Image (cartoon, rainbow, N blue to C red):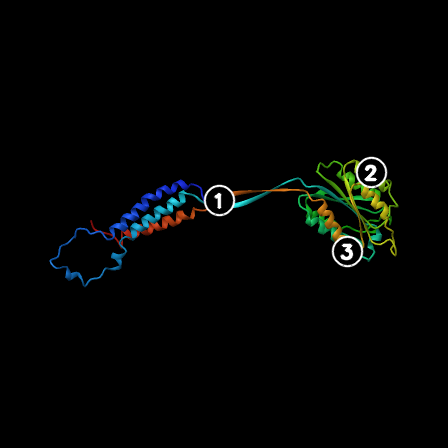
């Protein structure tokens, strides 16, 4: 569709009188008229050439015609279009469950596991659109950090300021089941077309009143999908990742289980989850037409003023 148009094309019919006037003036350019004064010998005038004033004597008439044309173009309403894009399709609700136990301070990820996970989570959030994303942190207990929200600036600020467990006065144990249950409780009342928990931990469940399998079954009964990410190796570190339990949780939650051995793995995992949880959206384009002809009013008034001045000064004639 064109981005320029005249809204009232029928107005251009008014150009016919202007075109007829131009044709008439052009025809009369060579027409002979009766002399005003009679001379016995016209050769006396041969030494006099036509002045600039004589050559431009039709200028006021042409300016009148130009004013008429400008006003007709204005009445035709020239317009340009601005495209308005509206997106339809509901977002999904995602809760990020992040392990903050002290074992996440291990430096096998630069600068440590928690900081690497926070950076990757921030990148994941920045790539989402229209989705509500919440944050749950857990160690030996689980806490709400942010309910599902589309205010990503606030969410990213909370992710960045997420502390280690000891900074909150918590013991160095890991309640994976409580992390799942807390995240599921946050999503329980959601009416989004898809509800997802993304759980990241580097340990095994050794705290909390709910075991991970029971929590996963409860979340699955609510229609919540669970992705699990085990971060780090199980040897040579202060905690051991219970990969088999994480795999069972993902299976129960109809999601997938991932193992991240370095920071690049983490980026790739969250990118894959982001692509798996894409929601189909429809973009609708609407053209908003805006009139742009109003400056022609000033131009037409200026041309008309010049025509009036010239007609009553330089090109003034005596009847």
Mark 1 and mark 2: Cα distance apart in space: 57 Å
Give percent across and percent down for residue 39.
12, 57
Mark 1 or 3: the one toward you? 3
In the rendered image, residue 223, in percent from the top left (x then y), is placed at 76, 37
Drawn side of residue 146 relative to residue 238, left or right: left
- Label 3: how many Cα within 10 Å (few below 14, some 14–19, many 20+): many
Secondary structure beneath dot 3 equals helix
Q: Dot 2, how many residues are within 10 Å of its Cα: few (below 14), some (14-19), or many (20+)? A: some
Q: Earlier in the sequence, mark 1 or mark 3?
A: 3
Q: Which mark is residue 290?
A: 1
Indicate which label's residue lies in the foreground, 1 or 2.
2
Q: Residue at (33%, 43%) from the top-left corner?
A: 16
Q: Residue at x 34, y 46 (%)?
A: 68
Residue position for label 2: 217
Q: Which corner quadrant of the image does residue 190 belong to?
A: top right
Disc number at residue 263?
3
- Regarding mark 2 in the picture, which secondary structure is present there? helix
Residue 146 showing in the rendered view: no
Side of 247 where 38 appears, left or right: left
Disc 1 on helix, strand or loop? strand
Q: Are marks 1 and 2 in contact (CB under 8 Å)?
A: no
Quick one: label 1 or label 2, which is nearer the N terminus? 2
- 238 vs 309, nearest the viewer: 238
The location of residue 209, given as percent across then percent down, is 87, 40
> Residue 308, how many percent across, how many down?
30, 50
Is residue 295 or residue 11 the one in the foreground? 11
Image point (52%, 43%), residue name: 287
Pick whichever of labels 3 and 2 is earlier in the sequence. 2
Q: CA distance from mark 1 to mark 3?
A: 51 Å
Query: Residue reaching furthest bottom?
Result: 47
């Amino acid at each position: 569709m064109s981005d320029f148009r005249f809204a009232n094309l029928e107005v251009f019919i008014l150009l016919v009188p202007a075109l007829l006037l131009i044709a008439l003036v052009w025809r009369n350019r060579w027409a002979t008229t009766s002399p005003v004064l009679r001379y016995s010998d016209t050769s006396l005038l041969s030494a006099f050439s036509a002045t600039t004033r004589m050559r431009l004597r039709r200028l006021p008439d042409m300016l009148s015609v130009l004013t008429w044309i400008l006003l007709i173009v204005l009445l035709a309403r020239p317009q340009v279009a601005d495209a308005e894009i509206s997106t339809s399709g509901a977002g999904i609700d995602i809760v990020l469950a992040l392990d903050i136990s002290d074992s996440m301070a291990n430096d096998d990820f630069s600068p440590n596991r928690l900081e690497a996970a926070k950076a990757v989570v921030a990148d994941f959030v920045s790539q989402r659109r229209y989705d509500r994303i919440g944050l749950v942190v857990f160690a030996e207990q689980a806490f709400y950090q942010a309910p599902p929200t589309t205010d990503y600036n606030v969410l990213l600020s909370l992710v960045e300021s997420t502390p280690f467990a000891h900074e909150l006065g918590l013991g160095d144990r890991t309640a994976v089941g409580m992390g799942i249950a807390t995240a599921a409780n946050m999503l329980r009342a959601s009416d989004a077309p898809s509800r997802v928990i993304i759980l990241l931990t580097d340990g095994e469940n050794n705290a909390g009143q709910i075991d991970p399998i029971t929590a996963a079954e409860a979340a699955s009964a609510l229609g919540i999908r669970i992705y699990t990410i085990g971060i780090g190796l199980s040897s040579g570190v202060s905690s051991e990742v219970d990969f088999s339990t994480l795999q069972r949780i993902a299976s129960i939650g109809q999601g997938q289980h991932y193992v991240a051995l370095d920071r690049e793995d983490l980026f790739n995992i969250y990118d894959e989850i982001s692509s798996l949880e894409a929601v189909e959206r429809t973009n609708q384009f609407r053209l908003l037409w805006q009139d742009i002809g109003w400056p022609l009013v000033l131009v037409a008034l200026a041309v008309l003023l010049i025509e009036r001045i010239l007609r009553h000064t330089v090109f003034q004639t005596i009847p």
